[in-house]
Image: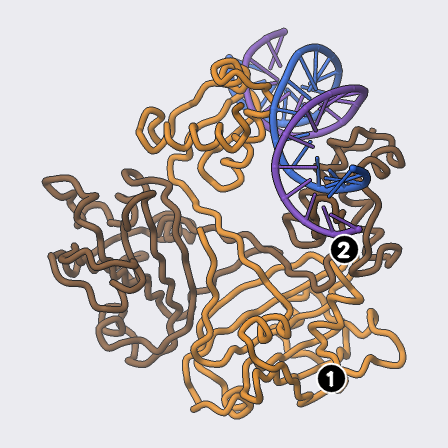
Chain colours: A brown, B orange, C blue, D purple
Amino acid sequence: MAGWEDIRAEVLSRIRSKAWPLGTLIPGEEALAQEFGVARATVNRALSELARSGVLERKRKAGTRVAALPVRKATLDIPVIRAEVEARGAVYGLRLLRCEMDAPPLPVQARLGQDLGQMLHIETLHLASGRGFVVEDRWLNPAILPNPLPDFAAISANEWLVAHVSFASGDISFAAEAASNSAAAALGIPQGSAVFVTERCTWAPDAPITWVRLVHAPGYRLSTVL
Amino acid sequence: MAGWEDIRAEVLSRIRSKAWPLGTLIPGEEALAQEFGVARATVNRALSELARSGVLERKRKAGTRVAALPVRKATLDIPVIRAEVEARGAVYGLRLLRCEMDAPPLPVQARLGQDLGQMLHIETLHLASGRGFVVEDRWLNPAILPNPLPDFAAISANEWLVAHVSFASGDISFAAEAASNSAAAALGIPQGSAVFVTERCTWAPDAPITWVRLVHAPGYRLSTVL
DNA sequence: AAGTGGTCTAGACCACGCA
DNA sequence: GCGTGGTCTAGACCACTTC
């Protein structure tokens, strides 16, 4: 019996073998279903998966074609920092460096799209077996926080958020930068070292939740399979 | 009528509202299908999507539970470099710096998992409107190349590969590094500048295809939505 | 207007993983 | 075992897009 993964494999091999060159319009679902002797839904599943991974481009009425300039799609896992530390076999620790109300700098206001006035500014050093792993610089919308505040010296803002304000949408970006003086001092590395920086901005349906910037210790790699 | 996206939204909202706290076992597909008045397949589609994005964990027999420590999954687009340059509204250019057979350094051999002997070593500078954008350092398995060789001064190895050895599997990783002397010279930036580095390793079903390292000009950001 | 992919249904069988 | 999710089928209707 042919499952959708078999269909996917067969389609892929036809593309690889140039039976269906890049940019080609391939037969419709009905035709393929008949050829392979399966239901149309099975072909649909196979082709949808290939479209999701960037190999095919599908449009109603226009049909399905092999992507001309394939854009590979890779999936990144974004774990909670503690999980990331423990996955490396290290002991997680955390040190709260700052936790106070303040006016966010303009770039942060701009990214959040509005001026919320005073926000809660938290700086945390995450440790892996006692060594600096990540410096977290976070601005939080005070409107989403409970009163009294959670104890951010015991549970990182990162983790408190996923447990209590879970599953918001947002965006994330990665870049390489020279370590600022304060980040370098916290991580115990030379000023200006090349560091991997993650910036994330998350939103509730109605209002901004948080903006955060993670400065990773040198040697950090973000990896995934294609 | 309730579509699978409505079901997904409803499930998400129950998680957000803590009706189904983190770690909870949620009702089975059959039960939910009945509750929402849809077919089980529709519920399955909704829950599968949520599992794919890391919100739910599903196991046969064990059932479906809300992920205790959610691992957010983000999708990265990995375009061909020329497309990336043109997407920024710049004019793409390319300069071939090196193209010769040589023995790869040990780290490259190690990543490929075997010693292939001599490989084709290609260095390319990719330009965006005349300015250095990316330096590509690539080692190619000569067995997959045609004779005579493609003209890598006209079409980048990057692009030739997606068009002719398409859709292999592999892995990719990102890091921040200090620019090496040669990369800095090619990009016209100070030595030791913090640069964003992409490393990719791709495989055919049977043999390695290529190992490549991309050094991006300062200011490069990799971004996506969550 | 017509053709294509996207989705839904009702039912069925199967594979996995727990007891 | 046996319950759960994973998948398949045959048929249907709909939404989108191009003509």
Helix, strand or loop at mark 1: strand
Side of A71 relative to A183 (left or right)? right
Q: Which mark is residue B213?
A: none
User: Neighbour class for label 2 at 10 Å: few (<14), some, many (≥20)?
Assistant: many
- Whole-percent x, y for residue A149 in the image: 13, 44
Task: Say above or below: D10 vs C4.
Answer: above
Q: Residue at x 43, y 22 (%)?
A: B26
Q: Is residue A132 visible?
A: no
Identity, as a three-letter code, of the amino acid under mark 2: Val
Mark 2 touches mark 1? (CB < 8 Å): no
* Residue at which label 1 appears: B102
Between B37 and A210, the one nearer to me in the picture: B37
- Whole-percent x, y for residue B157 in the image: 72, 76
Between B104 and A121, the one nearer to me in the picture: A121
Q: Which mark is residue A66?
A: 2
The quadrant where residue A219 appears: bottom left
Q: Residue at x 75, y 84 (%)?
A: B154
Q: Chain of mark 2?
A: A
Q: Chain of mark 1?
A: B
Task: Say above or below: B64 vs B212.
Answer: above
Q: Residue at x 32, y 81 (%)?
A: A192
Task: Say above or below: B47 vs A88.
Answer: above
